[in-house]
Amino acid sequence: MFDPNRSVLQHIDLPILNKHLVQLFIKRDDLIDPFVSGNKWRKLKYNLEMAQRSGRIGILTFGGPYSNHLVATAAASQEAGLCSVGIVRGGELNAQSNKTLRLCAALGMHLIFVSRKKYALRNERYYWEELLLEHPDHLIIPEGGANYYGIIGCQEILNETPNDFDSVYVAQGTTTTSIGILFSVAQKTSLHVVPVLKGYDSIGEMRALLNYSGIEPSLYEELLEKVLVCDEYHFGGYGKYSVELLDAMEEFFRQTTIPLDPIYTGKALYALMDRIRKGHHDGQRILFIHTGGIQGGESIAQKESRTFF
Ligand SMILES: *Cc1c(COP(=O)(O)O)cnc(C)c1O
C-alpha cells in the first residue's frame, strides 16, 4: 500500500556534529506519505492487514481533535478499501471544527464526537462491545494504534537501516513506536526516548502496553534496561511549545531542509542536539527516527500559530 522505500536514511552534516565527532543519521519515515504520518503508518500496517484478512468492513478508532492517528487511519482505511469510524474527544466539536477533522471527514471517516467523560472509557471492553453493536464487523484499534500489531509494525523500522548505532532517539506518545524499536535494536545500542507529555512515566507506560499486548515480562524486562528516558524536553506538556523550540526547529530546517513538528519530532530533536552539545554522545554513531507529524504537508502549529518553514 505505502512504500517504506521512501523512508530514506539521511546522513546529517552540521558543525556541532563535527565538533563532537558525532555521526548522525535520520530515518525519514516522514517521507512515507503526506497524510499517513510516518510511524502512524507503521502502527496501522498489520492492523489493516488483520482487518482485511478477517473480512471486517471497517476500522474504528479513537483520537483527540488534532490526532495524527485519526488522519492516518482515515487515509489508510480508504486506501485499503475499508470504511473508518473515528471517536473524537470533545462533544462540542464537529467535522468542520479544525483542519485535522476536516481532513478526516474528506478522507471518508465517519466522525462521532463524545464528551471527555465518555472518551475516558476508550480502553474499556464494555464500551468496545457497545460500539461494536452500532458498528458491526469493524476492527477496533486503540488510540494511537497502541496494540500488538502496532508494535510489530514498528519493529520493521530498524531493519531498514544498518542497525549498528550507539544510540537511537525517538519521540514518545503512547510508547508503541519505542517498544517496536526496542525489540529490534542491536545489542550495543541504547534507546533514548523523549516523552512529549509532562510527568509521563515512560517505563511504566511501556510495561503497561507490553502487558496489554500479551508479551511475557521475561521477554522484555532486561530489554527495558537499554531505555534512557530524556524527560526534560516536554516544553510544558503535550501540544505546548516555546519560541526557543520553534527557533531551534526553524534553524534546523534552514540547515538541513528537514521539517519538524512542534508536538513530537521538534522536541525529540531538540533533546538530541542539547545532549550532544552537553557532551553525552562524543564519538558516537546516532540514529534519529523522524516519526512524521506533518499533516498534508504542514504541521498544526505552522497552521495555527506562526509560520516557520
Ligand atoms: C504519534 C506520534 C508519535 C508518538 O508515537 P507513539 O508510538 O505513540 O509513542 C511520535 N511522533 C509523531 C510525529 C507522531 O505523530
Image (tube, grey):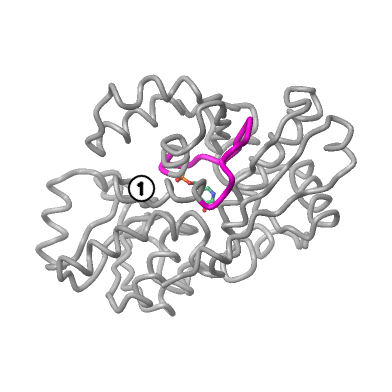
Q: Where does the image place residue 27, in percent across and percent down from the top left?
A: 62, 51
Direction from residue 212 to residue 180 in the image, left or right: right
Direction from residue 72 to residue 238 in the image, left or right: right
Q: How many marks?
A: 1
Q: Where does the image place residue 204, in percent across and percent down from the top left?
A: 39, 25
**Residue underneath mark 1:** 152
Q: Residue at x 16, y 59 (%)?
A: 131
* Residue 16, quarter of picture: top right
The span shown in magenta is: 160-176
Q: Nearer the viewer, residue 217 or 259?
A: 217
Q: Nearer the viewer, residue 14 or 268?
A: 14
Give the answer, above or below, for where 79 lies relative to 165. Answer: below
For the C terminus, the quadrant is bottom right
Q: Where does the image place residue 191, in percent across and percent down from the top left?
A: 55, 31
Q: Where does the image place residue 183, in percent across and percent down from the top left?
A: 41, 36
Q: Residues within 10 Å of mark 1 (few under 14, many from 20)?
A: many
Q: Nearer the viewer, residue 134 or 172?
A: 172
Q: Residue at x 48, y 29 (%)?
A: 200
For the N terminus, the quadrant is bottom left
Q: Residue at x 81, y 29 (%)?
A: 277
Q: Residue at x 76, y 63 (%)?
A: 307
Check residue 153 for magenta coloring. no
> Would residue 285 be visible to someone looking at this image?
yes
Helix, strand or loop under label 1:
helix
Q: Amino acid at mark 1?
A: Ile
> Would residue 264 be visible to someone looking at this image?
no
